[in-house]
Amino acid sequence: MLKRAHIQQLRSFLMDGTGLDNWYEDEDSRPYGQRLEEEERPIWKLLEKTFPDGKALDEAVDKLTGALAANQSVFLEIGLRAGAVLLFDLLRENPEGNGYLRGDSLRNR
């Protein structure tokens, strides 16, 4: 259970309906910045190769970054709403704040 109480496990379950174990995917321990840089690098290289003209490249990059920004905003909003729903459920099930909501660790139980 503690292994599944990880942000990437929760993300996988909420987005795909499965846990990382079902996809044979390991937890990614790289820092967020490194993950983004390494996963984005191939698309930027492809764009530069596909659009050697500076003006066309700028236009493609502008459109791509606009689409990525919209995706980022939407998924952040969804994540915040999902977090609020989870918090509300925890509070409803435990209105006194005993245990987990007081900050007691799962490991101490």
Image (cartoon, helix red, strand yellow):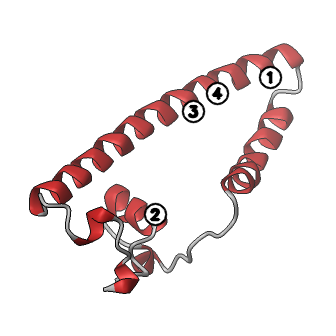
Mark 1 highlights which residue?
57
Q: Residue at x 39, y 79 (%)?
A: 22
Q: Residues within 10 Å of mark 3 (few under 14, many from 20)?
A: few
Indicate the quadrant containing the N terminus: top left, top right, bottom left or bottom right. Answer: bottom left
| Marked residue nearer the N-terminal end (2 or 3) | 2
Residue 11 position by quadrant: bottom left
Q: Residue at x 57, y 32 (%)?
A: 68
Residue type at the position of mark 4:
Thr
Residue type at the position of mark 3:
Leu
Q: Nearer the viewer, residue 25 or 107?
A: 107
Q: Nearer the viewer, residue 102 or 15?
A: 102
Mark 2 highlights which residue?
7
Mark 4 highlights which residue?
65
Residue type at the position of mark 2:
Ile
| Marked residue nearer the N-terminal end (4 or 2) | 2
Mark 3 secondary-structure assignment:
helix
Mark 1 secondary-structure assignment:
helix
Q: Residue at x 44, y 74 (%)?
A: 20
Q: Tell me where residue 92 appears, x and y as whole percent.
A: 10, 55
